[in-house]
Structure formats: C-alpha cells, structure tokens
Image (cartoon, rainbow, N blue to C red):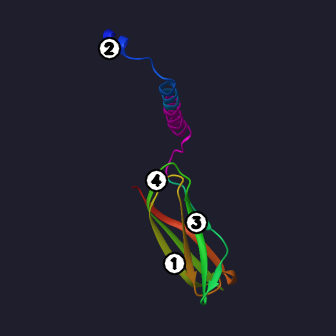
C-alpha cells in the first residue's frame, strides 16, 4: 500500500477497532489454551482403569452390570479389551469381554456385562486385559 493510498483511505470506524480488539483477544485465548494444554498435559503410556458404573439392574432374568473404562494416561490406546468374570462358590458362573476400538487420553467409554446369576452372590472381577498402540 503506497503513502497516497493510505492518505485517501478514511480513518477506521469504531466498529472496526472493536472487531480488531475482539479478534486479538480471541486469538490470544486460543494460543493460551494451546500452551496450557501442552505444559500441563499428561505424559506416558495409556493408564486404563475399569470400574463399575452404577447399580446392577435385573431385567428378564438377567443381571446387567454397568461399567466405565477410563484412559488416565497421556497417550491413546487402540483395541482396549475389558473382561468380566463372575465366580460363585469357587465356580465360574459367567464371563464376558468387550473391546473398545479407540480411547484417547482422558477418554471414558461405558458398557454393560450381562449375567445369568446375581453378581451379589459371588465375586465379580472387571479388568482391562489388553490394548495396542494406535
């Protein structure tokens, strides 16, 4: 832009100055969020934790056991495999497995295992048994 073009251009309006200020603030906020996420982000491999996620519900002679699996680690995990085993009086009375295709850092997935016997009558074990790198 030449000096002549600048001299012919009318001064900026109040709306233009406000728009410029808001734009600068928004870009600054986005950059701040990126820096904070980079500085405070988790590091290390996936840390997969499974736990029961609500009460057991009986429906149609089956016991539904809700669960949630969390990735508390810094990296993503692929093909996360969760298994459940119900043991009553020393005998395995029910087993199940579920696989979640992808879990990023901080992600939570939910599911349910179904059993033909009441889990309260025995010992129910929920466990993450495997995962792979994406």
Q: Residue furthest bottom?
A: 61
Residue 70: x and y, percent? 56, 59
Q: Residue furthest right?
A: 120
At x 46%, y 69%, the residue is 99
Q: What is the spatial separation of the Cα atoms under label 4 and label 2, in whole angstroms?
A: 54 Å
Crowd rating for badge 2 (residues with CA inside 10 Å; few <14, some 14–19, many 20+) = few
Image quadrant where residue 119 sits? bottom right
For marks 3 and 4, the one nearer the N-term is 3
| Label 2 sits on residue | 5
The secondary element bearing badge 4 is classed as loop
For marks 4 and 2, the one nearer the N-term is 2
The secondary element bearing badge 1 is classed as strand
The verdict on residue 47 being magenta is no
Q: Check contact, mark 4 vs mark 1: CB within 8 A.
A: no
| Label 1 sits on residue | 96
Check the image and report above or below for 18 versus 70.
above
Please identify the dominant SS of the magenta region: helix
Crowd rating for badge 4 (residues with CA inside 10 Å; few <14, some 14–19, many 20+) = many
The secondary element bearing badge 2 is classed as helix
Residue 32: x and y, percent? 53, 33
At x 59%, y 69%, the residue is 67
Image quarter in which the C terminus is found:
bottom left
Q: Which mark is residue 76?
A: 4
> Which region shows up in magenta?
24-45
| Label 3 sits on residue | 68
For marks 4 and 1, the one nearer the N-term is 4
């Amino acid at each position: 832009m030449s000096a002549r073009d600048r001299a012919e251009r009318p001064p900026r309006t109040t709306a233009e100055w406000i728009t410029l200020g808001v734009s600068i603030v928004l870009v600054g906020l986005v950059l701040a969020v990126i820096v904070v996420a980079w500085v405070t982000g988790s590091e290390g491999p996936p840390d997969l934790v499974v736990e029961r996620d609500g009460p057991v519900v009986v429906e149609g002679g089956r016991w539904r056991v809700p669960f949630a699996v969390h990735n508390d680690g810094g990296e993503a995990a692929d093909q996360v495999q969760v298994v459940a085993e119900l043991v009553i009086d020393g005998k395995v009375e029910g087993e199940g497995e579920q696989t979640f295709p992808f879990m990023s850092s901080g992600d939570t997935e939910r599911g349910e295992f179904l059993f033909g016997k009441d889990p309260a009558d025995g010992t129910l074990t929920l466990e993450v048994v495997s995962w792979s790198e994406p």
